[in-house]
Amino acid sequence: MVDFLQYIDDSPTKGIAEKIYNNQRITPEEGLLLFRKADLPLLGILAGIVRKRINKNLVYFNRNFHIEPTNKCVYNCRFCSYHKPADDPESWEFSIEQMLEIVKKFDGKAVTEVHIVGGVHPDHDLHYYGRLIKRIKEHRPDLHVKAFSAIELDYMITSVGYSIEEGLTILKDYGLDSIPGGGAEIFNEEVRKMICDEKASSDLWLRIHETAHNLGIPSNATILYGHIESYNHRIDHMDRLRKLQDKTGGFKAFIPLKFKMRNNNMSQIGEVNILEDLRNYAVSRIFLDNIPHIKAYWPMSGRDAAQLSLSFGADDMDGTIDDTTRIYSMAGSAEENPALTTEEICKLIRDAGFIPVERDTLYNIVKQW
């Protein structure tokens, strides 16, 4: 470590590096300094120290598939490429029976999770989606149902007059196992007002996840980065998540999601490059010292970029997906038909110098490959 530190000329960055090496929490101000001043190779080294401390040399994945019930949505966020009006030829709405047919396509396959997210449909409440979960559990009781972003939950629960706690309790009774991290976008209220003014506030997103954690429903968390936000906004976002995690311990993974420019009302601002992606992964891993996993969501970034992110703090590659999500392909992802076999995802991990580990949704190890 002495040899490592002597090559860091900037004393504030050197002091932060010493704190990270000694397993001391960095402050938001120090996180901001890393974003602004630290060289990318240094960030890779520091993030590597943290990821190895938490996850050794392991990289996780699971066998999963997605159901996207609809892309019809009561909201029209400026960054969204997924939303379509009801009369658009690219809009869709699956019935419960059609969604069950998607589940049945995986009969006899060793999948462990179904991930259900979509648009906020104006006519479907928590009982509609609860019946879907119940039917899935009746057909395949062992399948973990990870479903509905906080934005979907807010609408489907409050539209029928329940409190958030009441609604989540009902959904848990239907069979909901965990919730994903979508809809967080960026917590800064001013930026949020400019990019997604209609949807649930930052405070409400955090309250929904806190309530879920208190009910024994674990969740993930996300950030949407690379648009009009600043480094200050990213650190503020992560700091709010870190504080909630200190309180509940309910977040399993943090997932940086990159703004993609195709087919939305913010296309003119372009996209940040892969160097910025790696910087964001690294600072996320360093700052979020209490969230155990950082996920490289390869349908968003592409498999090669996700593989590279493993050297900048990420330790999870999500799952096999099997071409069941369109959210990022509609926004211009390189992965137009996202699907990886177990062998392909293991090879990506091994070629990056790590050990592939198949997990379930809650990161219990199924098999080390």
Image (cartoon, rainbow, N blue to C red):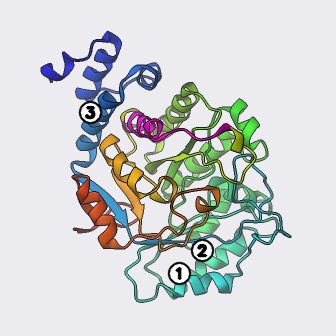
Give the side of residue 344 with respect to residue 4, left or right.
right
The percent coordinates of residue 228 (x first, y second) are 65, 33
Residue positioned 21% across, 17% down in the render: 7
Residue located beneath label 2 in the image: 174
Compared with 133, 292 (above or below) is: above
Provide the secondary structure element on which disc 3 rests.
helix
Tell me the amino acid under the disc marked 2.
Answer: Tyr
The percent coordinates of residue 3 (x first, y second) are 13, 20
The percent coordinates of residue 335 (x first, y second) are 51, 62
Write down the region rendered in magenta.
269-285
Residue 205 is a magenta residue: no
Cα distance in 3D space between marks 1 and 3: 44 Å
Cα distance in 3D space between marks 3 and 2: 45 Å
Tell me the amino acid under the disc marked 1.
Answer: Lys
Residue located beneath label 1 in the image: 137
Tell me the amino acid under the disc marked 3.
Answer: Ile
